């Protein structure tokens, strides 16, 4: 929820991100979801609908969109 931010989201500092990973999230699933969303700039729904073939080819190589 955005309160008194004039419709803008807050940017997390490096310390806040580390605190979330160390103390805020208590299981690997949540840490993975947060990490994917953070580093890929995607939303939770986008992250949750990712499938293996979205990331790896049938031969086990990463899909690259350079």
Image (spheres, rainbow, N blue to C red):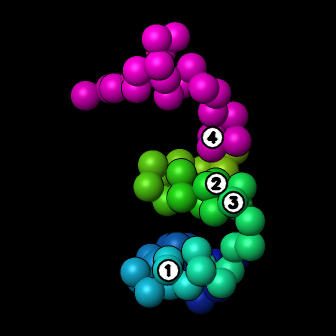
The 10 Å Cα crowd at callout 2, few under 14, some 14 to 19, many 20 or more, is some
Q: Earlier in the sequence, mark 1 or mark 3?
A: 1
Look at the picture and state if 54 lies above or below 37.
Answer: above
Nearest to viewer (mark 2 / mark 4): 2
Q: Earlier in the sequence, mark 3 or mark 4?
A: 3
Q: Position of residue 57 (x, y in %)?
A: 47, 15
- Position of 58 with respect to 1 (left or right) is left
Which span is picked out in magenta? 46-66
Nearest to viewer (mark 2 / mark 3): 3
Marks 2/4: CA–CA distance: 10 Å
Task: Work out whether residue 22 or residue 42 is closer to the camera in this orientation and state it.
Answer: 22
Residue at the disc numbered 4: 46
- Determine whether label 2 and label 1 are within 8 Å by CB: no
Marks 2/1: CA–CA distance: 15 Å
Residue at the disc numbered 1: 18
Disc 3 on helix, strand or loop? helix
Nearest to viewer (mark 3 / mark 4): 3
Look at the picture and state if 2 lies above or below 31.
Answer: below
Q: Residue at x 57, y 20 (%)?
A: 53
């Amino acid at each position: 929820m955005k309160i008194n931010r004039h419709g803008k989201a807050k940017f997390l500092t490096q310390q806040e991100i580390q605190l979330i990973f160390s103390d805020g999230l208590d299981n690997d699933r949540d840490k993975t979801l947060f990490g994917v969303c953070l580093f890929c700039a995607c939303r939770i729904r986008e992250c949750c609908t990712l499938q293996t073939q979205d990331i790896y080819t049938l031969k086990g190589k990463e899909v690259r969109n350079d």
